[in-house]
């Protein structure tokens, strides 16, 4: 049984957006990280992004410039699964979202890793149980769902399966805390875990409101940004329900729930947009019209906001 205090080496499989971001988090926390990707070019780009992101954080007062090179020096890159996995205490799979690929990867990693090495997948929505189904060591396979950008969003959903042993969950929760993150435990392996279920319940209603002509996209977004969205970091739904009273929540739900969107299919409006190639940033038209300047400004505003929140939280 592994202890968080004994952890030295973390292996990250996949060097894309989440792979390099999670490698950075563990390296900053003082762990040796082996970042594995099949292509040399991906690894080179990953290291470049890590240097850039650490520079951005230091500029914003999160971390120090003099700690950047030592953190980078703790990350080694490899194109070999074996080299990454051997001696690793925790292996985090961040390869593409493809069930067949993840099943094969875990079956292979399970054969390579020491019996007490914990194996985690960063899948966004897929069943952890199904991902682990071709592996022998189901007792040590679980989900850790990180959020993008991993170095600024604290949340990690640690997802159980019925097969995973308790010590694996406890160890993973402890390791995520030691890496400076905010883990929460999802007790059942359900699609969307906790936070994406909440998020997409909101998105479904937002799209439905536009589809039914109740408000235009900007108005829907404004209603949250200038209203309940402001309260959310301090007063989330269940605290809010307690504050106003379960009786009031019941009265509201008794009246309003029958009017809310409850479709189990994606919105026809969303399907129509995709059919017309109105994909958002990718095609510069979605719910809004976009230009390279407004897209950059939106991304910059988000990073700026998240960095300010992170500084305040220090
Ligand atoms: N991007 C997000 O916001 C986000 C958030 C949470 C979770 N995730 C999940 O994290 C995982 C990675 O997502 P991403 O956004 O980093 O994707 P990405 O496309 O940026 O990176 C995926 C990487 O996996 C590599 N890869 C593909 N097959 C591989 C294999 N057989 N072995 C090793 N590497 C392989 C690719 O070369 C690529 O570098 C996915 O499961 C995704 O659903 C993504």
Image (spheres, rainbow, N blue to C red):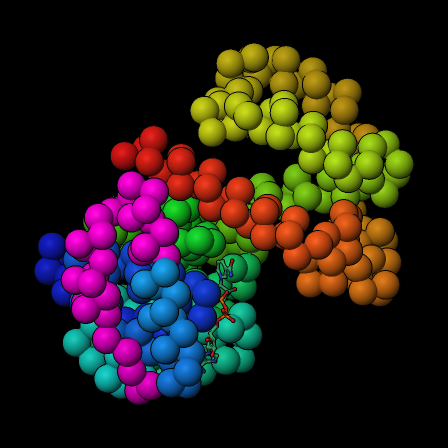
Q: Residue furthest left?
A: 6
Residue 13: image location, x then y, percent: 36, 74
In front of the other: 213 or 75: 75
Please give left or right for residue 22 compared with residue 188 in the image. left
Q: Locate residue 15: give its quadrant.
A: bottom left
For the question of whether residue 257 can be seen, the reply is yes
The residue positioned 69% from the left and 30% from the top of the image is: 222
Region rendered in magenta: 53-80
Q: Quadrant of the N terminus?
A: bottom left
Q: Which x, y percent locates residue 177?
A: 26, 46
The image shows residue 252 at horizontal and vertical percentages of 70, 18
Q: Is residue 275 above or below residue 146?
A: below
Q: Residue at x 59, y 47 (%)?
A: 297
Residue 20 visible somewhere in the drawing: no
Asked whether, in this view, residue 203 is left or right of residue 175, the answer is right
Q: Residue at x 53, y 23 (%)?
A: 231
Magenta-colored stretch includes residue 72: yes
Q: Tell me residue 277's x, y (percent).
A: 81, 65
The residue nearer to you, when weighing 300 against 236, is 300
Residue 154, by quadrant, is: top left
175 or 305, nearer to the observer = 305
Horizontal arrangement in the rendering, residue 12 relative to residue 271 (left or right): left
Q: Is residue 43 left or right of residue 217?
A: left
Q: How many marks?
A: 0
- Give the residue at x 82% y 36%: 216
Q: Residue furthest front?
A: 293
- Magenta stretch encompasses residue 309: no
| Image quarter (top left, top right, bottom left or bottom right) of the C terminus | top left
């Amino acid at each position: 049984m592994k202890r968080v205090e004994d952890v030295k080496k973390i292996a990250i499989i996949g060097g894309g957006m989440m792979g390099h971001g999670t490698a950075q988090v563990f390296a900053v926390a003082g762990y040796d990280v082996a970042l594995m990707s099949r292509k040399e070019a991906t690894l080179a780009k990953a290291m470049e992004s890590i240097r850039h992101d650490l520079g951005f954080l230091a500029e914003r007062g999160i971390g120090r410039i003099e700690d950047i090179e030592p953190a980078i020096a703790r990350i080694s890159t490899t194109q070999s699964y074996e080299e990454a996995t051997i001696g690793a205490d925790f292996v985090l799979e961040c390869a593409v979202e493809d069930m067949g690929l993840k099943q094969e990867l875990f079956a292979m990693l399970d054969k390579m890793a020491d019996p007490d090495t914990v194996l985690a997948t960063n899948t966004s929505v897929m069943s952890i149980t199904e991902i682990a189904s071709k592996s022998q060591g189901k007792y040590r396979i679980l989900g850790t769902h990180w959020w993008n950008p991993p170095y600024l969003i604290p949340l990690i959903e640690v997802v159980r399966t019925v097969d995973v042993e308790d010590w694996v969950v406890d160890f993973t929760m402890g390791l995520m805390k030691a890496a400076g993150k905010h883990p929460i435990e999802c007790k059942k392996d359900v699609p969307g875990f906790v936070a994406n279920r909440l998020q997409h319940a909101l998105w479904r209603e937002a799209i439905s409101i536009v589809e039914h002509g109740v408000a235009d996209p900007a108005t829907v977004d404004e209603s949250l940004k200038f209203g309940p969205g402001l309260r959310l970091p301090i007063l989330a739904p269940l605290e809010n329900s307690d504050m106003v009273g379960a009786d009031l929540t019941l009265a509201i739900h008794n009246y309003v729930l029958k009017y809310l969107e409850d479709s189990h299919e994606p919105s026809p409006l969303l399907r129509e947009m995709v059919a017309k190639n109105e994909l958002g940033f990718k095609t510069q038209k979605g719910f809004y019209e976009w230009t390279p300047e407004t897209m950059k400004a939106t991304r910059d505003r988000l990073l700026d906001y998240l960095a300010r929140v992170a500084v305040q939280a220090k």
